[in-house]
Image (cartoon, rainbow, N blue to C red):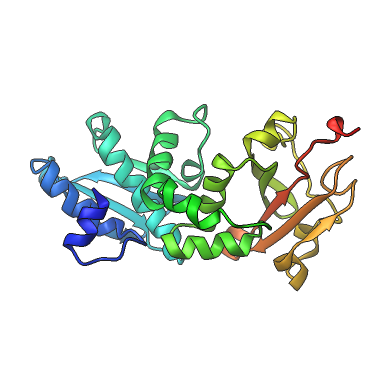
Amino acid sequence: MLTAFNAAHGLDRFPINVGLVAQEYSKSVFPDEPITLVEGKNFTGSFEGALVRNPIKPKEWGIFYNSGLSSKGRINFTLAHELGHYLLHRALVINEISCSKTDMRAWDSEYGKMESEANEFASFLLMPLDDFRAQTKSWKVFRIRDFAALGTRYESSTTATILKWLEITTKRAMVVVSKDGFIDWSWSSKPLLKSGVYFRAKQETIPIPDKSLAAKGPSEISIDGEWLPEGVWADQEEVFETALFSDFHNQTISLLIYPNTPPGYQR
Ligand SMILES: [Zn+2]
């Protein structure tokens, strides 16, 4: 659908212009209930986006993103998430769905089925798997800066790009988002999870390790990455970390790559 759409509008395959796709696609496929407004909105509070029924013409819809968002990738991901709600959930919506920052990273279906569905939709819309695999296939080292560059290709957020990779990789890897020295949330790849490595940051207060790059602050090493010895991120394993320090909500993102073989398997 998108390939045809982009050809018809003379657009490049990437990045996906979600605002345009939302309006044109809904108008042609659901002409009785189109999306007629895509706009930034000054949300007070913590909302990042919303799908809203037109109060005057209730069959029409608007999708909004937080106009305080400065990154194009975050805006585009938010719009894609709201388009997901429109396509999947609009029949269930009375007036509007408002989505928080937490909703935007809910990949865990236990958190909320509708939110994780909207995120999955956004992820596949912005970063189709065939292209995503082709882009990352030859990578030998996994650093945040390369995911940030991929985020620019797809106009998706760096975090969403890393989460996409964690979904499909055979590596033992994890993203850790921290704030004020404590883990806010983390996500492990399936192979890492299988070897029993994860943080329960929702249940416990977990400080980031003193000797981690995340704790040391921005430097060239945090960009290039470093193998940190046993006892920093893991008791029995070295871990390769790169870290990104974001002004946005003072977040620090660490990408952790663990050895392919968990320690219990070593002979
Ligand atoms: Zn949502």
Q: Is residue 198 left or right of residue 21?
A: right
| Residue 48: % across, % down | 42, 52
Residue at 19%, 53% (x, y): give it: 23
| Residue 223: % across, % down | 70, 67
Residue at 68%, 51% (x, y): give it: 178
| Residue 146: % across, % down | 59, 63
Q: Quadrant of the C terminus?
A: top right
Q: Is residue 164 left or right of residue 43?
A: right
| Residue 136: % across, % down | 55, 55
Whether 14 is drawn above or below 204: the answer is below
* Residue 91 seen from this side: yes
* Residue 43 seen from this side: no
Res 186 → quadrant: top right
Residue at 33%, 58% (x, y): give it: 16
Tag count? 0
* Closer-to-camera residue (121/140): 140
* Closer-to-camera residue (10/155): 10
Whether 160 is drawn above or below 14: the answer is above
Residue, far bottom: 220
Residue at 40%, 59% (x, y): give it: 75
Q: In this view, does 233 lie to the left or right of 144?
A: right
Q: Quadrant of ligand 1?
A: top left
